[in-house]
Amino acid sequence: MERKPTHASILSPQAVDWSEVRRRLEILQGAMARSATPAVEEIRRILKSRAKALAREAPEKEGGENFIQVVTFLLAFENYAIDSCSVREVYPLKELVPLPGTPPFVLGITSVRGRIISVLDLKKFFDLPEKGLTDQNKVIVVRADFMEFGLLADAILGTRSIPLAEIQPSLATLTGIRSDYLRGVTKDRLVVLDAARLVSDPRIIVHEESMA
Amino acid sequence: MGVMAMKWFLNLSTRAKLFLGFGLMVLLLVVMVTTAYDGIATIRESQRRLYELDFEDAVDLSLLRANSNGARMETLEMMLTPRPSEQEALQRAIQNRKRTNDEIVQRLQQRNRGDAEFLGPLGEFDQLRKAYEEIRDEKVIPLALQGKIDEAQALGVGPQAERYDKMRSILRRLDDAAIEDARTSLAESDRKAGESVRILLGVGLLAVILAVAAVLFLARIIASPLVEISRVAERVAAKDLTVGVPANGRTDEVGRLAETFRKMVENLRSVTRDIGEGVNVLGSAASEILASTTQVASGASETATAVSETTSTVEEVKQTAQVSTQKAKYVSEAAQKAAQISQTGRKAVEETIEGMRVIREQMESVAESIVRLSEQSQAISEIIATVNDLADQSNLLAVNAAIEAAKAGEQGKGFAVVAQEVKSLAEQSKQATAQVRAILTDIQKATSAAVMATERGSKAVDAGAKQSVQAGEAVQKLAESNTEAAQAATQIAASSQQQLVGMDQVALAMENIKQASTQNVASTRQAEAAAQNLHQLGQKLKQLVEQYKV
């Protein structure tokens, strides 16, 4: 019965309160005008809260030698971190060109400020589920002594400093190639990669001769 | 010859036999009576002659002697009596006796005419008497009267006395002769009477013998077969119909009786057999009738009950018909009103169709507005994408800045703070854009829903318009139907009125039926009782018939 509206509800003018609708529309227009030019008090309040948040975070980062600076990123919903010192920069993944005749973990090549670098997919190494490439994907440009390459990341989370004491050695259960690149795991399940070992691994180097 | 006669006699009718038998009797009786009459007549003749001739003569002679004696005695008395009165009386008596003697003599003479033997002495006596009386009357009596008794006596003793003696002797002689005659006649009469008695006895004996023989014969030829038949009749009376009647082959009444009786017994037997069968049929029929009647009685009772119920139902139907009449009138009026209302409804429907058209236009403009809104939302979305891209790039820049600051070491620390600040701003921008995008998604969904709702509304309005047209047609049909309904209701009202009248008649008829049914029930009860009686009668008849041996 309720599904079927009665004639009274259709025909009666009380069904839609047009004056109420008009009132709400006016309020919304007023709010729009106000938000376009925020009040001075509002701006001041936002700034103040930011200042507070920053002021609280400062003492945590003190500590000197026992901390390492890392760039944290997402790989298939897992948090990974890599030492900032081995990272040259992060860059949005644009115009990836697939490279024929390369192993599956080599996604392709891209141009970063005029330099051509290869992009590796760690998910292939770590047997993580594929997610597909979007324009949200980022490339972490890693620079070692003699070579430079990009690591595909689903998203860049930011930079942070981690106390060295917090990094626990790699789990005994982890074996194979995965354990080879890990430096350790923190309490909050952040997997810290060892950039130096990653770079020095001969497996990532494509030998054209062997391919040929 | 004798057998033939016997046969002829046997075949004579009983009446003829009886006539013959009794005729014989009567003949014998006539012979007897004739014989007796003859004897009696002979006796009576002899007696008459005895009386008339001998006996009367003797009496008359005695009287004559007595009178003569009396007259002499009175003459003597007159001589002895001195008184003249007495003498005169005596004289008169003497004269009377003289006249009497005259008459007697005359009588005797007349009676014994032709009898010379008798008339001779009598004439002599008469002469003597007359002479005696002449002397007495002319001489003796006058002397006595004159008182000359002696002379008179003298006259009397002399010749007079002689005469008297002669007279007396003649009379005595005659008297004796008369008595002798009488005695002879009596003896003759006795002889004749005895002869008559003997003849009578002989004839009577013969008659008795013949009568006994006839009776025995008739009894043998009439009674014996009747006894035989009566024995059979007794067995029939004792309800034994198996008995056979012997046929004697006679054609008289007895033979016919036997034949008829035989036929009667046969008929009785067949009739009894038929009656037995009929009684069986009657018994079963009576049982069936009784059962049927019982059923009919119960049926009649049920019918009576049903009729009562029907009567009350008819009453209810009557009331219902009254209500129907009123309702039909009410419906007729209502239908007329409804016809007017449906005209109004038609106008309203036309207005509704017009209103629907306006609503559709409004809906179209609303839909256009919403589509424009959606397009503008799309523009906002593009702007937001740009902003998001900017925030993303700002974020990367902040990360790179932080990396650079980390590489710079202690000198880059201030720069790291700025980089952190930039990163925070970038993330806030990104969150804001995400919120805006979410809102825009909502708006997009809402506008899509609104467009679809408007479309649905538009279609609904179209359908409404179509339905309004249909409603208009329906209202038109409704109006026509109402007009028809009004007419129908008027007809129903009339019909109901007729029905009411009819139901009145039905009620009357039901009342009659009810009475008839009540009578029916009573009649059926009587019929049931009659059937019961019939049943009992059949049983009784059966018992009766079963007593007969067929």
Image (tube, rainbow, N blue to C red):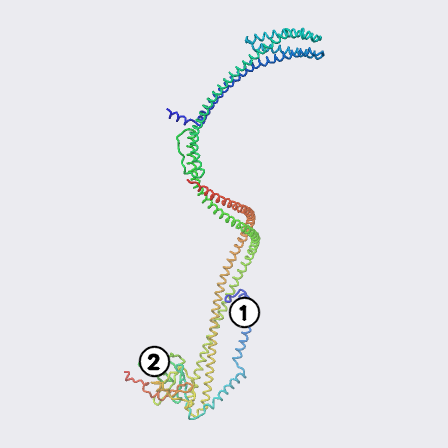
| Camera-side residue of B367 and A103 | A103
Reading the image, the residue beneath label 1 is A16
Image mark count:
2
Q: Amino acid at mark 2?
A: Pro
Give the spatial CA distance, label 2 vs label 1.
59 Å
Category of crowding for the residue at label 1, using alpha-carbon neighbours closer than 10 angstroms: few (below 14), some (14–19), many (at least 20): few
Q: Nearer the viewer, residue B126 or B337?
A: B126
Q: Kindly identify which chain the residue marked by label 1 belongs to.
A: A
Residue A195 locus on image (x, y percent): 37, 88
Q: Is residue B34 visible?
A: no
Secondary structure state at the residue bearing disc 1:
loop
Classify B379 as above or below A63.
above
Q: Which quadrant is the C terminus of chain B positioned in?
A: top left
Q: Position of residue A170 (x, y in %)?
A: 37, 87
Name the residue nearer the viewer: B234 or B140: B140
> Mark 2 or mark 1: which comes first in sequence?
1
Front in this rendered view, residue B12 or B43: B43
Kindly identify which residue carries mark 2.
Answer: A98
Side of B272 where B176 appears, left or right: right
Image marks 2 and 1: residues in contact by CB distance under 8 Å = no
Q: Is residue B505 above or below residue B149?
A: below
